[in-house]
Image: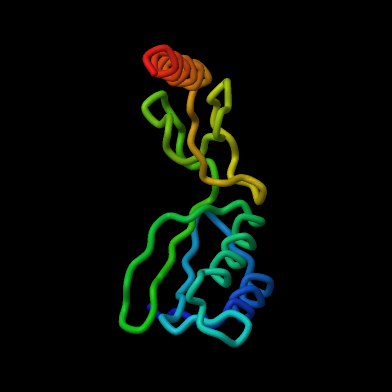
């Protein structure tokens, strides 16, 4: 397969603007020497900018494959998977969401985890009781 290898965040944004993703999935080939603002992207800021742009198109990461000198990142349209009770704690849920219902993966959403309110209150109670016992003993 002939992939257009993207060498910088700026090039990646231009590529996405001129070739917006379509369909259920798409791929991006990112160079191992990927840069952001003319510097090596060691902190991942450039990839974060690309991911933000990809989320604007309502796609989410779907794995990658290592090649010689680059990686092929795969993305799929958001909402391709139905979440079940077994998915609680995996991506797609907001932290401390009392309803624990799935959310879309639009640009403002993040991968977060749900901790049901009951568990948080239980841990606060346990820590409080331990503190009270220590205060009484000491």
**Residue 97, percent from left and from top:** 58, 27
**Residue 60, percent from left and from top:** 52, 53
Residue at image position (66%, 56%) is 56
State which quarter of the image contains the C terminus: top left
Asked if residue 24 is positioned above or below residue 102 in the image, the reply reads: below
The answer to whether residue 66 is left or right of residue 136 is left
**Residue 55, percent from left and from top:** 61, 55
Check the image and tell me how it is coloured.
Answer: rainbow
Residue at image position (49%, 62%) is 26
Asked if residue 35 is positioned above or below residue 92 in the image, the reply reads: below
Residue 48 shows up from this direction? yes
In the foreground, 3 or 103: 103
Asked if residue 107 is positioned above or below residue 50 in the image, the reply reads: above
Residue 122 shows up from this direction? no
State which quarter of the image contains the N terminus: bottom left
Residue at image position (31%, 82%) is 68
**Residue 28, percent from left and from top:** 48, 70
In the foreground, 109 or 42: 42
In the foreground, 23 or 7: 7
Q: In the picture, residue 12 is in which quadrant?
A: bottom right
Residue at image position (45%, 31%) is 83
């Amino acid at each position: 397969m002939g992939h257009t290898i993207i060498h910088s965040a700026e090039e990646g944004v231009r590529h996405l603007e001129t070739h917006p993703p379509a369909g259920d999935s798409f791929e991006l080939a990112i160079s191992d020497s990927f840069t952001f603002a003319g510097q090596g992207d060691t902190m991942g800021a450039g990839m974060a900018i690309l991911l933000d742009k990809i989320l604007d198109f309502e796609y989410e990461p779907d794995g990658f494959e290592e090649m010689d000198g680059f990686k092929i990142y795969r993305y799929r349209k958001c909402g391709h998977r139905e979440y079940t009770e077994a998915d609680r704690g995996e991506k797609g849920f907001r932290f401390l969401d009392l309803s624990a219902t799935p959310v879309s993966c639009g640009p403002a959403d993040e991968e977060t985890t749900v901790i049901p309110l009951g568990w948080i209150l239980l841990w606060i109670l346990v820590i409080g009781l331990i503190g009270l016992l220590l205060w009484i003993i000491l």
